[in-house]
Image: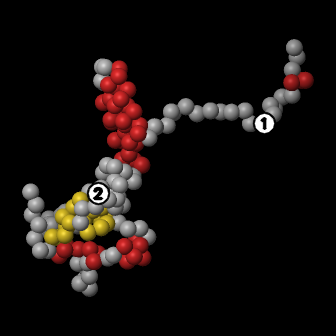
Amino acid sequence: MTTKTPETVTITVLTSGLTIPGPSNPASYFHTEGRTALRGEVVEVERSETVNRLGESWLDLDDEAQIARWGVVRFRIGDHVEAEGIKYLGDDDERITFRRREREVQEARKITDAAERRDELNRIYALYGRGDSGQRSTGYSGQSSVAHTDMPY
C-alpha cells in the first residue's frame, strides 16, 4: 500500500546513516519521529519535512551536490535497489553484515540434512563472505633472549 501524495518523494538510500525525517511530534524531545536509514531501503519521504529554514530541501540535491555536501552520494530519487547492486539492507555497514551473517549461519547449522546444510552455508558465505576464524598466531619474531649455547644440556 502506498500513501504517495504530490508532496511524497520515493528515494533509495545508497549509504547507511541517512537520517529520514518523520512526522512532527511535539511530545518528542526532538519534536520529530525521524530515524536512520540503511543502504538499500526504499523510503517515502514528505518533502515538507525536509525543508530547511531557507526553504531548501535536501531532496533537490543531485549526485554532485550530495558529494559536495556529504562527500558521498547518499540517495537517489526512485527505486534503484537492483540498479545499484544492493544485496541486502545495510550491506555497507560491517556491523550489520556481521550480525546478519552470524544469525544466518546459526540457523543454517540447525539444518539436519548435511547436503542441505552445506548448500545453505555456501550460499551464506557467497553473500556475506567467510567470517574471521578467531584463531590468532603468535609467530616467532626474532632471537630468544637466552642463547642456546648458554643452556645446560
Q: Earlier in the sequence, mark 2 or mark 1?
A: 2
Of the pair 49 and 78, the residue shown nearer to us: 78
Is label 1 in a helix, a strand or a loop?
loop
Left or right of residue 93: residue 143: right
Left or right of residue 129: residue 152: right
Residue at figure coordinates x 42%, y 49% from the top left: 94
Query: Which residue is the extreme one toward the front?
Result: 83
Q: Quadrant of the N terminus?
A: bottom left
Of the pair 106 and 12, the residue shown nearer to us: 12
Residue 3 screen position, x and y as percent:
9, 63
Look at label 1 and name its amino acid.
Gly
Left or right of residue 22: residue 134: right
Q: How many residues crowd around disc 2 within 10 Å: few (fewer than 14), some, or many (20 or more)?
A: many
Residue at figure coordinates x 31%, y 20% from the top left: 113
Residue at figure coordinates x 38%, y 42% from the top left: 127
Question: Residue at label 2?
Answer: 81
For the question of whether residue 69 can be seen, the reply is no
Q: Quadrant of residue 7?
A: bottom left
